[in-house]
Image (cartoon, rainbow, N blue to C red):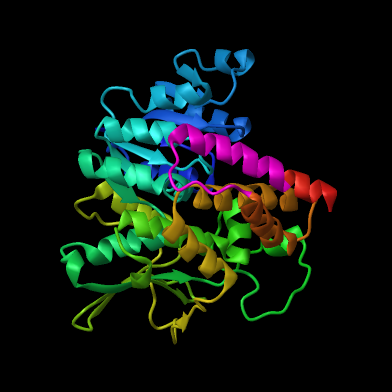
């Protein structure tokens, strides 16, 4: 039986990972689970899967006493400790933000197999992580459906023969519509995917696709000219790779995170699954529209790839705080990109950053975004 540690077990990805574990009964032992805040769901998971280890952001003596056979870790160091346990076969990174950045670096140092669903790690520290990945024996497998699809499409291919890769985007809840001041509930009503609130808002602003472009640049070592986006509302084609002979390979599946998760857990093999299959009799057509590379979100992604350093850190952190403010009803939807770009214009660009610099810049950008919102 293989051991899995899931960071972010109460989120959408984490819940889907545990559902795959259920379907693969007897194959996986849940060695460790990590949760930041959702204690009600976390308690149910601990009761069902009985992990030997667990992580919480802050110690809660009453909560811990309920699970006497589980050893708990806390704080940023606790995340590094739980991923350093002996006997781990797979670590899933699914906590949004950069809180798991140090733990991810520890996993690389430990040469672990990693399922990466936290795109912010590559967005803010792609240059650092990329250099480490070249020297590490770790295997990094993307969990996000788009990057997972590109990974699959490129298996066995000579990377020098890649002409372009295409990430697909559903377009979010407002694709083809003119809505000037949507409410939080309207923004969170994604027509296809069931995702966490942060990613759903980013999908509506298209900033999620900007971050995915940056992540793809580092994951696949591709220059920005070989990265593109296609708007695909049906969300059945998750990524395409075009070779220099004109051949295009695409990865199709129903819009269900259990597909890429199953791939990561079964890699390098494949296993039968019970997930919903594509019925081509019901899907009459596929829409694929080129995204506008001059769109602000696309331009910011390309600028982040070109500049690197502090620029993508500020882009990520300012947007994260702006989305948080929107979800709390402090700002309107249209203010999210406005605040993000204003913070970008205020920051003192650095071409090189360390891990500690990243945490410092993250704090600064969030404080500036909150200050701008408070002053408006």
Query: Does residue 106 appear in this view?
Result: yes
Residue 106 against residue 350 in the figure, above or below: above
Q: Which residues make up the magenta segment?
A: 347-369
| Viewer-nearest residue: 192 or 208 | 208
Question: Which quarter of the figure is the N terminus placed in?
Answer: top left
Apparent side of residue 259 relative to residue 43 in the rendered image (left or right): left
Residue occupying the point 31% across, 49% down: 141
| Viewer-nearest residue: 296 or 156 | 296
Apparent side of residue 232 relative to residue 328 in the rendered image (left or right): left
| Viewer-nearest residue: 306 or 110 | 306
Apparent side of residue 67 relative to residue 166 in the rendered image (left or right): right
Magenta-colored segment: predominant secondary structure = helix
Residue 105 image offset from top left, x and y in percent: 36, 34
Q: Does residue 361 belong to the magenta stretch?
A: yes
Of all residues, the one furthest to the bottom in this rendering is 284
Residue occupying the point 52% across, 79% down: 292
Q: How many marks?
A: 0
Residue 342 against residue 138 in the figure, above or below: below
Residue 29 image offset from top left, x and y in percent: 32, 31
| Viewer-nearest residue: 41 or 215 | 215
Query: Does residue 99 appear in this view?
Result: no
Residue 126 image offset from top left, x and y in percent: 39, 48
Q: Does residue 98 belong to the magenta stretch?
A: no
Residue 14 image offset from top left, x and y in percent: 47, 43
Residue 165 against residue 366 in the figure, above or below: below
Residue occupying the point 30% across, 58% down: 220
Residue 101 against residue 282 in the figure, above or below: above
């Amino acid at each position: 039986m293989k051991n899995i540690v899931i960071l972010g077990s109460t989120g959408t990805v984490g819940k889907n990972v545990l559902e795959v574990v259920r379907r693969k009964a007897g194959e996986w032992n849940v060695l460790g689970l990590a949760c930041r805040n959702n204690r009600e769901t976390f308690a149910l998971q601990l009761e069902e899967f009985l992990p030997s280890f667990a992580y919480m952001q802050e110690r809660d003596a009453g909560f811990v006493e309920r699970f006497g056979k589980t050893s708990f870790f806390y704080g940023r160091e606790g995340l590094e400790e739980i991923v350093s346990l002996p006997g781990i076969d797979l670590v899933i990174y699914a906590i949004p933000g950069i809180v798991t950045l140090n733990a991810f670096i520890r996993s690389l140092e430990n040469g672990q197999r990693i399922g990466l669903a936290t795109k912010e790690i590559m967005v803010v520290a792609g240059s650092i992580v990329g250099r480490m990945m070249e020297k590490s024996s770790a295997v990094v497998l993307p969990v996000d459906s788009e990057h997972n699809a590109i990974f699959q499409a490129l298996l066995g291919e000579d990377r020098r023969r890649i002409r372009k890769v295409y990430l697909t985007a559903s377009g979010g809840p407002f694709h083809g519509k003119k809505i000037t001041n949507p409410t939080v509930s309207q923004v969170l009503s994604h027509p296809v995917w069931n995702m966490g609130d942060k990613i759903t808002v980013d999908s509506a602003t298209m900033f999620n696709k900007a971050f995915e472009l940056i992540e793809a640049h580092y994951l696949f070592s591709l220059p920005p000219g070989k990265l593109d986006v296609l708007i695909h509302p049906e969300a059945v084609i998750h990524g395409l790779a075009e070779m220099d002979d004109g051949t295009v390979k695409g990865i199709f599946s129903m819009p269900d995170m259990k597909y890429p998760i199953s791939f990561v857990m079964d890699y390098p093999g494949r296993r039968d699954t019970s997930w919903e299959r594509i019925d081509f009799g019901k899907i009459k057509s596929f829409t694929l529209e080129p995204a506008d590379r001059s769109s602000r979100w696309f331009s910011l992604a390309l600028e982040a790839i070109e500049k690197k350093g502090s620029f993508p850190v500020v882009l990520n952190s300012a947007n994260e705080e702006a989305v948080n403010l929107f979800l709390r009803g402090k700002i309107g939807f249209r203010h999210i990109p406005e605040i993000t770009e204003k913070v970008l214009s205020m920051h003192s660009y650095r071409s090189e950053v360390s891990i500690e610099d990243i945490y410092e810049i993250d704090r600064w950008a969030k404080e500036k975004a909150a200050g701008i919102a408070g002053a408006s």
